[in-house]
Image (tube, rainbow, N blue to C red):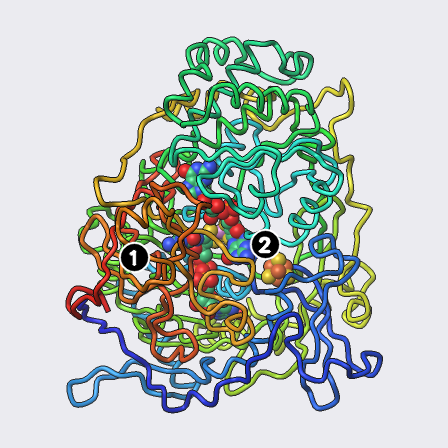
Amino acid sequence: MQSRRKFIKISTASAGTMMLPLSFPSFFSGDDEDVSKLKKVPTYCEVCFWKCAGWAYVNEKGDIKKIVGNKFDPHSNGRFCPRGTGGVGMYNDPDRLKQPMMRKTRNGKQEFVNVSWNEALDFIAQKMKDIKSEHGAESLALFNHGSGGKHFSTLFKAFGSTNITAPSYAQCKGPREEAFKATFGKSVGSPEPADIKNTDCLVLLGNHIGENMHNNLVQEVADIQDRKATIITVDPRLSTIAAHSKYWLPIKPSTDLALLLAWINVIIDRGIYDKDYVEKYANGFDELKNHVNDFTPEWAEKITEIPAEQIKKTAWEMAQAAPKVIIHPGRHVTWYGDDTQRLRAIAILNAILGSYGREGGFYLPNKGKLPKMPLPAYPKPNWSWKEMMGDKYPYAHYSVANAFIDATHPDFKGEHKLKGWFAVGTNLTTTIPDQKRTLEAIDNLDLFVVVDTMPAEICGYADVILPECTYLERCDHPRISPHRKANFAVRMPAVKPKYLTKPASWMVMKLGNRLGLQDYFPYKDYSEVIDWQLRQIGSSLADMKQRGVKLQPEFNHGLFIKDGEDYNFKTASGKIELYAHDLEKKGFDPLPFYTEHEKPSKGFYRLNYGRAPMHTFTRTTNNPNLTDLMDANNLWVNSITAKENSLYNGQEVWLKNQDGIVSAFSINVRVTERIRPDMVYMIHGFGRSNKMLENSYGKGISDSELITNVKIDPIMGGTGMRANFVSFITEKPRKEEAIV
Ligand SMILES: Nc1nc2c(c(=O)[nH]1)N[C@H]1C(S)=C(S)[C@@H](COP(=O)(O)OP(=O)(O)OC[C@H]3O[C@@H](n4cnc5c(=O)[nH]c(N)nc54)[C@H](O)[C@@H]3O)O[C@H]1N2
Ligand SMILES: Nc1nc2c(c(=O)[nH]1)N[C@H]1C(S)=C(S)[C@@H](COP(=O)(O)OP(=O)(O)OC[C@H]3O[C@@H](n4cnc5c(=O)[nH]c(N)nc54)[C@H](O)[C@@H]3O)O[C@H]1N2
Ligand code: SF4
Ligand SMILES: [Mo]
C-alpha cells in the first residue's frame, strides 16, 4: 500500500557475499578442532523464547566454533534444537544491519542514509523530548519481543511511559493466560509447568509439539513416547505428533470447544471425574454439570466430525490416567476470537480430572531470584495502556499490542493517543494481523524507531533504524524463568560486535544520557550490573562464567499439592473457579459455550499455518544455516482439493484471500493426505519482502499478508487469525494485483 512513510527498499550494494551453504547438524567448519583448546562462554539462546542456556565455543581467532546446551539447564538439558545450533547464522548472516540509518528526503525522494550513532541518537532524543512536551511522555509506546526489550523498558519507564507491549500476549499466549487465571487464579506462564515427563496421558489440541520445537518440552514428549504413554492429538492436520499419537482426531477446524464440552459431559455423566479433588478444591461443579448436560458426544459429533464413540473412548482414556493427565493449554492460541473460552474449557477439564498441582499433571513452578540494582524511583505516568484501552477487553491483565495500533490510528476517538513507537525485536507487519491497519497507524506517527539485527520488513517503515548486535555478541539480563527447580542463567558476549552494531543496553544508556536519565543506567558495560547482582548472592561474573546456570534450591517449594493439603488457589474464593465469577462480573459467560464460526465459501479453503522445526517466524528465514535446511514454505493441499482445482504436486501457485488480497509471491503445492480437504497449510515466516534480505527475498508466501479478517477476543483482545480463506491462482498475477 502507499503510505507517507514510503517503504524503502534498503540498498543492497553493501550486502556482502553469500555464506557458503553448510548442512545440518554441523553448521561449523573445522568441527574436529580440539574443544578443550577453545574458550567456553555462557549464553542463552535468542533464536526463540524458550531461552535455552548453553555454551558458545570460540577459538583464538575469535571464530565461534560450536554452540551446545548447558547440561545443568532445565530448558535444554544439555541439548540445543537445530535452530539453537544454527544460531551462529544470526551472527554470520551477511545481510545483517551494519550501522544506524535514518530516513531522509533527497531530491524529493525518501531514502535511508547511513548515519553515525551520535546523529541517530541525538535525533531520537530530541524527538522524544518534543513529543513529551507536546503530548506527554505517555504517548511514546514500546513494542518489544526478546531480551533487548527489557533494556528499552527501563528507558521508557524512566522517561515516563509504561505503554509497553509485546506480541507474545494478544498474538500468542494471552487467552490461555487469562483462562487459567480465571480458573486457577494463576496464569500458565512460560515455560509451561506441564509435568509431561511423568504423565500417562497427554492431550494436545492444535499444539504441534515436535514441529513447535520448544526444547525440553519436545524431549519430554519423546520420553513418554518411549514408555508408551497415551497421546491424544486433536488437529485437522496429521502433524508429526499426531502421527505418533494413539489417537488422532482430525477435527473440523474451529470446533474444538464443542469437543471439549462433550469430553466434560462424558466425564461428569459417567462419574469418572476426581470427586475428592473437586469437592475439596473447586467451586461451581453443579452449575458446570447443568451447563454441559446437553453437550453430548452425539451433539459434538455433528459439529466436530469426530465420531461420538471416539469422543467417549478418549474421555475414558483421560479419566483412566488421571490425575496423571495433561490437557495441554497450547501456546499460540489466538485462533477464532472465542479463544479464552476454549482455554477455559481446557482449564475446567484439567480441574475435574484433578491434574492441576499433581504429579504427571501440572506442577507448581519454582522461580530463582536475583536482587535488582537499586535505581531511582520511576516517575508516575499520568495514564497507561489501561486508561488508553478504556473498557475494551476488560479481562486483559497485560497490554494488548493491537490496542496500541488502534490508539495510533487516525480513526481513534479516545483521549489517550500514541504518537511515537519503538519496535525492538519484533517484525510488526508480519506479526500483527491486518497489515493495512498497522501501516495506517505507522503513517500517523511522529517518530518510529526500529531496533533489529536484520533488515526486517518493519525496518522499511522506520524513521531511524538502530542495528543491534546479536545475542552472541552481548550480555543481557540474567534469565530467570520458572521451572521445576529455581535457577538462573547468564549470557556473556562470546565475540565482539560485528560492524557498527551495539547492544540494546548500550543504546538505552546513551539515550539516557541525552535525556537526563543517566542515573537509571549506572554502567559503562551491562556486565557491571550483572556482576553487582551476582555479588549480592555470593557469586560473581567470574564464577558464573564457569557455570552458566545456577540452581537456587533455597527458593524451591514442593512441586505438587500434597494429599489432603488445604491448598489456597489465588482466586477470589480461594478455590478453583469452574464457574468463573470474575468473568461473569465483567459481562462474559461464566461457563464456556460453543459458537459456530465462519466457513469457507465455494472455491475457498481455510488458511492454516504453523511452525517448522528449523525456523522461528521471520527471525530465522534469512539465516544461512537454517535456510540450508528449508529455504521456502510450501502449501499443503489435500488430494481431493488438488483434484477439485486441477493442481499437481510441486505446482507454483499464488493465493487470493476472501478480501481480494493476492499474495506477493508464489508457493509450491504439496499434495498430501495429511490435511483435511477444507484447509491449506503453510509455515509462518516466509515470503520475505525486503530486498535487502538477499537470502530469503521472495521465497514462499507470507501467511501474514493474507490474514485480513481478524477475530478479536472480546475478553482480552487476542487477535484470532484462523478465519481467513484462500483460493488458488495458477497464472502469475499482474503486478497491481499483488501487494508488493
Ligand atoms: N501470521 C502470523 N502471525 C503471527 C504468528 C503466526 O504464526 N502467523 N505467530 C504469532 C506468535 S505465536 C508470536 S510469539 C509472534 C512473534 O512475533 P515476533 O517476535 O515479532 O516475530 P519475528 O518474526 O520472529 O520477529 C522478530 C524480529 O526480531 C529480530 N531480532 C532477532 N534477534 C534479535 C535481537 O537479538 N535483537 C533485536 N533487536 N532484534 C532481533 C528479527 O530480525 C525480527 O525482525 O508472532 C505472532 N504472529
Ligand atoms: N520450531 C519452532 N518452534 C516454535 C516456534 C517457532 O517459531 N519455531 N514458536 C514458538 C511459539 S512463540 C509458539 S507460540 C508456539 C506455537 O506452537 P503451537 O501452540 O503448537 O502452535 P499453533 O501455531 O497454534 O498450532 C499449529 C497447529 O494447530 C493446528 N490447527 C489449526 N487450526 C486448528 C483448529 O481449529 N483446531 C485444532 N485442534 N488445531 C488446529 C494446525 O494444523 C497446526 O498443527 O511454538 C513455539 N515453538
Ligand atoms: S528451543 Fe531451540 S531455538 Fe529455542 S531457545 Fe532452545 S535451543 Fe534456542
Ligand atoms: Mo508465540
Vertical order, 86 against 239 (above or below): below
Give the SS element for disc 2: loop
Q: Is residue 167 visible?
A: no
Q: Residue at x 64, y 18 (%)?
A: 281
Which residue is tagged 1? 418
Q: Nearer the viewer, residue 500 or 339?
A: 339
Q: Nearer the viewer, residue 564 or 72?
A: 72
Query: Which residue sits at x=31%, y=41%?
Result: 711
Question: The C terminus appears in which quarter of the rendering?
Answer: bottom left
Dot 1: what SS? loop
Q: Which mark is residue 213?
A: 2
Residue 198, horizontal then vertical, whole percent: 74, 36
- Kindly identify the amino acid type of the residue bearing the numbered disc 2: Met
Query: Is 461 on the left-hand or right-hand side of 177?
Result: left
Q: Residue at x 46, y 78 (%)?
A: 467
- Report the residue at 50% width, 43% height from top: 238
What's the CA distance linking mark 2 and mark 1? 36 Å
**Relative to residue 107, is residue 373 drawn left or right?**
right
Q: Tell me if residue 558 comes above or below residue 421 in the rendering.
A: above
Q: Which mark is residue 537?
A: none
> Crowding near pointer 1: few (<14 within 10 Å), some, many (20+)?
many
Image location of residue 141, percent across then percent down: 37, 59
Q: Are marks 2 and 1 in contact (CB under 8 Å)?
A: no
Indicate the amino acid at tag 1: Leu
**Disc 2 C-beta below 8 A from ligand 2:** yes
Q: Looking at the image, is mark 2 or mark 1 earlier in the sequence?
A: 2
Q: In x, y percent, where is residue 483?
A: 70, 46
